[in-house]
Amino acid sequence: MEQICLVTTVVDARSVADVLAASAVAGRLAAAARVSGPVDSTYWWDGRVETAQEWSVQFKTAPDRLAALVDHVRVAHPYDVPEILVATVGSGNPDYHSWVFDQTRH
């Protein structure tokens, strides 16, 4: 069974999340993207603790499309230091894994 990768990021507006999701899927860098939120995030920035409302985007992609997807998110992301987290899924519904692989082909 082919592995899939889950790539997660957060942004400060729903509209930005929607654009990231749509552009990655349209470019076949991801088979699908899920936008959720808002979520409240607390983090260190510029020497102090900040709290902000953010939107999460989770992309599903094939391993051979991972680097291109990460590059796309990094370039299109509005943050100076965007959160881009990657997890590899080694098991699950084989039909879904095949679908993700097929949808990330040109």
Image (spheres, grey):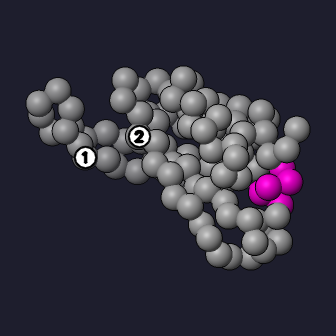
In the image, 99 versus 13, the foreground residue is: 99
Considering the numbered disc 2 on the image, is that residue within a helix, a strand or a loop? loop
| Quadrant where the C terminus is found in the figure | top right
Query: Pointer 1: what residue?
Result: 42
**Residue 17 image position (x, y, % from top left):** 57, 37
Left or right, 23 with reference to 20: right
Q: Residue 14 location in percent, x, y? A: 55, 37
Residue in front for this viewpoint, 73 or 42? 73
Prevailing secondary structure of the magenta residues: helix
Q: Residue 8 in the image: x percent, y percent?
A: 51, 49
Determine if residue 47 is in view.
yes
Disc marking residue 67 = none
C-alpha separation, residue under disc 2 versus residue under disc 1: 13 Å
- Residue at image x 51%, y 29%? 74
Instruction: Identify residue for label 2.
Output: 83
Picture coordinates of residue 5 (x, y %)? 61, 56
Instruction: Please give the range of residues in magenta.
Output: 99-103
8 is higher (above) or lower (below) than 70: below
**Of pointers 2 and 1, the one earlier in the residue sequence:** 1
Per the image, is 8 magenta? Answer: no
Q: Residue at x 65, y 34 (%)?
A: 68
Name the residue nearer the viewer: 17 or 31: 31
Of badges 2 and 1, nearer the viewer stands: 2
At 79% from the left and 55% from the top, the residue drawn is: 101
In the image, residue 56 above or below residue 89: above
**Relative horizontal placement of residue 3, taking residue 85 as reference (left or right):** right
Total label count?
Answer: 2
Helix, strand or loop at label 1? It is strand
- Can residue 18 be seen here? The reply is no
